[in-house]
Amino acid sequence: MSKFIRILIILVAVIALLFISAYIAFNIFGKNLVLKQLSSMVDRPVAIRSLSLRFPLVIKVSGLEIKDFLKSDMSLDVNPFGFLGGKLVLNNVFIKSPTLNLERNEIGVINIPLKMQPGPNKQQLPIVLGLDIRDGQIHYVDNYKNFSGFKVNVYNINVRVKKRGLGLSPAFNFAASASIGDENKQVKNFKTSGWINLAKKDMNGTLEIKDLYTNSILPFYSQLFGNNVSQANMNFDALLKAKNNDLNIKCHMILAGLQHQSQEEAEKPPEEAQKDIKVFSNLFDIFSSPDGKIEVDFVVYTKLDHPGFDRVDFGSSLFKTATKNILSKPPEEVADKVKEIGKDIKAWGKEKGKDILNDGLKDKDIEEIINIFK
């Protein structure tokens, strides 16, 4: 037997012995070590049913539970070369059937239980090169201000994030889909895909929402169209583009089937409920097409690292939509509707507060609007 072969056999035997030793040690002590580490990162009780190390360096976690926040099974594919640079690098994180419970309280804080450790002692997060989530669920409850009571459930969550290019540059391809509001819904009514570069703060992606019915996000519709919305359906798609952190979101939305509760169903005093229903339903009639739809295009300008509705530009979209819809209706019907809306808003504005509508619309203003359609 040659010297080279003997050295090779010894080297393989040493590597095998090291792995077996690490495997045994990890399976004996690893669970407590991981629990200790996780407990230092979150401010809730953490439990793990079992934890094991598999060849070559895959950590399998079963029955992970963070009380009242997360339940899941997962596996972590560790990149051994990351240790050479003193970092924990994960080639992929696979999360199976996670259930996440989120809640926003009365002051606007979401119940994410991470312990923030500023300064030199803060936790160093691992570098994740890939993420795969299968069959997840999110249950969200909102108790903040006007959204109090807002609940939404998201099922069938599937997410795939994969690194773009070589090295550790934070650029990723992403794709995700989910069903919103119905545990038994098989059609994915939420889809998004694209790519993002976190270092350059560039992005290109698409977002699509189909058939988002009232029972999914009723408080959201109520914020837009009054507190007495009982039925609505929305379709939405968007093109997201970011360059140097400037994010532009070109949106197209179709809203259909908007209905308000009856006076008896509303949770308001009968007179107040009836007035709100008349105002919002009449406005919807003006802006909607003959088949009961509102279709509008708009652009949201915001920042990639802090997205929000910083500036929303409807351009002439709303005016064109309203004009098109109005012209498709008999002039007499529109004139009567505008007159009715004007009088309702005049009375409604005075009751809500004189400063809201400047003491309501004047009678001559109502007449001028009506004359446009004669």
Image: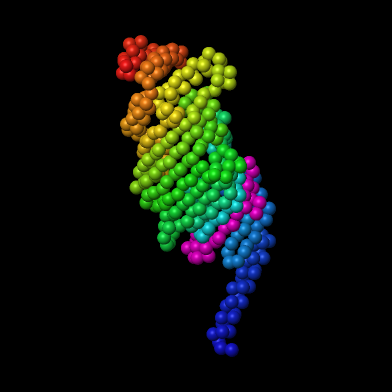
Which residue is depicted at the point 47% across and 26% down? Answer: 225
Residue 131 lies, with reference to residue 253, above or below; the image says: below
Q: Is residue 112 visible?
A: no
Q: Does 74 lie within the magenta span? A: yes
Rendering coords of residue 222 (x, y %): 50, 27
Magenta stretch, residue numbers:
62-88
The answer to whether 227 appears left or right of 10 in the picture is: left
Residue at the top extreme, as displayed: 363
Which residue is depicted at the point 63% across and 41% down? Answer: 68
For this rendering, which residue is in front, 254 or 72?
254
Which residue is depicted at the point 41% across and 60% down? Answer: 165
For this rendering, which residue is in front, 112 or 77?
77
Q: Is residue 156 visible?
A: yes
The answer to whether 271 appears left or right of 373 in the picture is: right
Q: Does 210 lie within the magenta span? A: no
Residue 225 lies, with reference to residue 369, above or below; the image says: below
Which residue is depicted at the point 56% across and 84% down? Answer: 5
Rendering coords of residue 148 (x, y %): 55, 29
Rendering coords of residue 178 (x, y %): 53, 45
- Quarter containing the N terminus: bottom right
Rendering coords of residue 327 (x, y %): 35, 25
- Quarter containing the C terminus: top left
